[in-house]
Image (cartoon, coloured by chain):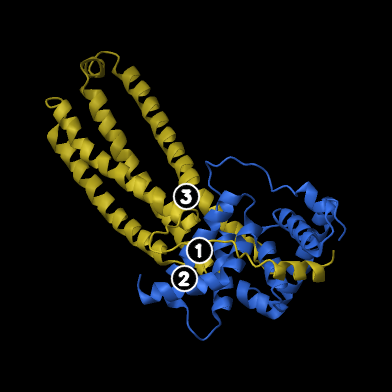
Chain colours: A blue, B yellow
Amino acid sequence: MNTKEKAFLELIEAHKGIIHKISKMYMDTAEDQQDLFQEIIYQLWKSYDSFQQQSKFSTWMYRVALNTAVVFFKKETRKINGSAAIPENMAMEESSFAVRELQLAHFYKAVQKLERIEKALIFYHLENYSHKEIGENLGISEVNARVKLSRAKTKLKELIKLQGYEF
Amino acid sequence: MNFDELQSAWHSDKGNDVVVPDSVTKLRSVATPVERIRKNMRIEFVVMLCLIISIPLLRVAYKDQLAPMPFYAMYVALIILTIFYYVKFYLFYKRLDVSSLNSKDSLYEVYYDIKLNIEMYRSFNYSVIPLLLLYQVMVIMSLPPVKAAAFASRQAYFIAVFSIVFLFAVVLAISFVELWIKFFYGNYLAQVRKVLDELKEE
């Protein structure tokens, strides 16, 4: 393994959590999530030379990862098992960890039903990006980002409520 | 739950149990529109190569019946057309490999490149179809019963039937090409278009 690849994999190791979260937002089965996770790493590696040190690695990575996820296809041959169910015993527990897990389970289940760009908007919002930054990353105007994000948030809220969880 | 709580839960999810591959050199793209198009182009290239190689075998099979001059003239035309278009397809294939789909601009670039090449692919097929149909006509006309019918007293009837069959074959071939384009390339183009539409200003 050469130095460049080693340095790249170290960066990926440090940011693997975020790539995994993007995969979970865009794909509903573990196998598809794993495929998308690997596809994102492949696309990041492919465009690694274009990464200029002028921007933060995470900023550049978000952009490549989301754009990969947006155009990623599920494997056609794979059986569709439906979206991930929310574990029943999780709903019974009251520890803060269990509550967070339950919230995330509801979130990931609902977010599957959003459009691809809406998912990207929600992702940037959860990562504390401003409307201006979201617009810059997606190549749309700040106003458009605000309008689309607001709509995506409302839609997400409704979907979570439909799942029977208070939002 | 509200968005602040969701954000807090989101940040607490570190994904520590996720395993990163040991090496990136073995990773291959499998499921992007670009990679699917590239894969289909590779398959098509092999099919076209087989077709080009198999055509002279017709001459071997129907040695005495097929006139050599038109046969080889059409073959040369077919090869020239194929080389001309496949050089362009190859350049497109290489361009797709370096395209990254990393921004809205690159998505647009890839979208119009795919669109342009679909048109080029269509025109290639429409140029090749008449040649391939003419080869079929040559073979059919070389069959003794057809040959006899062509020179028999009911020649007008024969020409009428033959023209209708030829027309039907042309329509069938064009329909096949259109379905092929839609299935192997058009669907992926539509996928990129859908993403671009979602990004449109409101």
Q: Which residue is mark 2?
A: A9
Q: Secondary structure at mark 2?
A: helix
Q: Is residue A43 above or below residue A136?
A: above
The residue under the point 51% across, 70% down is A12
* Amino acid tagged 2: Leu
Please give the chain letter of the residue carrying mark 3.
Answer: B
Q: Which residue is mark 3?
A: B185
> In this figure, what is the number of numbered marks?
3
Which dot marks residue A39? none
Q: Is residue A122 left or right of residue A138?
A: right
Please name whichever residue, B67 or B18, is drawn nearer the observer in this view of the structure.
B18
Q: Is residue A115 left or right of residue B185?
A: right
Q: Is residue A2 left or right of residue B180?
A: left
How many residues crowd around disc 3 within 10 Å: few (fewer than 14), some, or many (20 or more)? many
Of callouts 1 and 3, the N-terminal one: 1
Q: Secondary structure at mark 3?
A: helix
Question: x, y (%) of residue B15?
Answer: 62, 64
Which dot marks residue B20? 1
Cα separation between marks 1 and 3 = 32 Å
Please name whichever residue, B189 or A105, is drawn nearer the observer in this view of the structure.
A105
The residue under the point 78% across, 59% down is A98
* Amino acid tagged 1: Val
Cα separation between marks 2 and 3 = 34 Å
